[in-house]
Image (cartoon, helix red, strand yellow):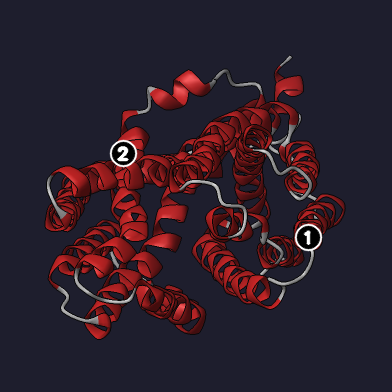
Amino acid sequence: MPRAFWFIWCGTLTDRLGNLAMLYLSISLVARYHFSATFAGLVLGLAGAGSAVGAIAGGVLTDRIGRKPTLFAANICTALFTLGLGVVTDAVPIALLVAAFGISGGVARPALSSLLLDVVPDDLRARALNLNYWAMNIGFAGAATLSGLLADQPRLALFAIDAVSTLSAGLLVVFRVRPPAAPKHSQSRDGGLGTVLRDRTFMTFVSLQTGMWTVICCLGLMPITMLHHGLRPSLYGSIIAVNGVMIVLAQLFVPRLLRHRSRTATLALCSALVAIGFGAVGFAPNALALAGTVAIWTVGEMLSAPVAGTLTADLSPAHLRGRYQGLAAMSFTASGCFAPVLGGLVMDHVGDLAVWLGCFVLGTVVAIGHLVTGPARERRAAAMRALEARDAEQPADAELALV
């Protein structure tokens, strides 16, 4: 892998290892600071909604002012908002700062993703995205461990660690990564967010990914079903740990497993596994069976991550890569905002089983959608790769020569 990629990888790991703020808030708003469960849910929803909005704004900024300026500004703002959350104790300031925290974090996503794709050759994209996804999950597991070890420390200390890790990750990438210059004629092409939204092939792909992530984001409802089935919700941590352990131990082998395999068939299989895993939650009689459901959908998540990432890259022209990455990131962040809310409403008014059967149906529809739309998507990706190759071969001073 290029040296620049490893700086980005280390930045991702550093940022995720210190990602303690939201972990602390999700646990402590009700247990320690005695806010209502409704307010705690609102706070988490604001973080997701802010991240979705930030992803779109970050995509536009990434293309207009550049990857590194956008990333650096976003990380500075995120660090400041994190420190603010370590100080305030009233409901309104917490809600406002969490929303701002979500927005600035969302702005950083497309900038970092675009920068990673800029520094990695096309034939190494899948491996690079897979390694970066692995770093994210190692960092998340480490952050969860650190949050437990530091739970008794002063509140501000946890938020200061988060702020320092965010700022350190940004500084590492900004000062150590030098992306290659884009071809001049590519930079001069017109385009904007509307161009991406009118891209039917890409938006269909984003819609399908949003469907899959909507299913996965219903995971937060599992403890409620466990309670209704007479299981201790405290077992949830051990059950969901299956996901992290599998990703940390096996994610590095995914590129070799998927080599020369159809991306369309792989994404359809991933969606089917997610559908089966979440659909089975409604019928799982004990904690061991629930752990088995997690193992099933985790395989789908692991296989999907590098394939979806490379497809997003292949479908996006270089001069609009930030916008494309922003909309792709929104498929995850928006799902995290509305999926638990909709699922909770269904649980209250229809029942638990309806939620998990709904997840199975939605995941199956997504799998079929990938099979139907995959061939056209691959033709478009091949055309985009050919266009990029032609752009790379054209001399930088071709326009001057023509003049």
Vertical relation: 226 (above or below) 48:
below
Residue beneath the point at 76% across and 45% down: 75
The residue drawn where x is 22% and y is 58% is 268
Q: Secondary structure at mark 2?
A: helix
User: Could one spot residue 317 in this view of the protein?
Assistant: no
Return the residue at label 2: 207
Q: Do we see residue 246 in this rendering?
A: yes
Q: Which amino acid does the dot numbered 2 rest on? A: Ser
Identify the residue shown where x is 12% and y is 52%.
Answer: 354
Kind of residue indicated by mark 1: Ser
Tell me: 131 left or right of 88.
left
Residue 112 spot, x, y in % from top left: 66, 48
Mark 2 nearby-residue class (10 Å; few <14, some 14–19, many ≥20): some
Of labels 2 and 1, the one closer to you: 1
Q: How many other residues sit within 10 Å of disc 1, few (<14), some (14-19) or many (≥20)?
A: many
Q: Which mark is residue 165?
A: 1
Q: Nearer the viewer, residue 66 or 335?
A: 335
User: In the image, what residue occupies the spot 59% across and 34% down?
Assistant: 54
Position of residue 74 relative to residue 124, above or below, is above
- Sequence-wise, the earlier of marks 2 and 1 is 1
What is the secondary structure assignment of the residue under circle 1? helix
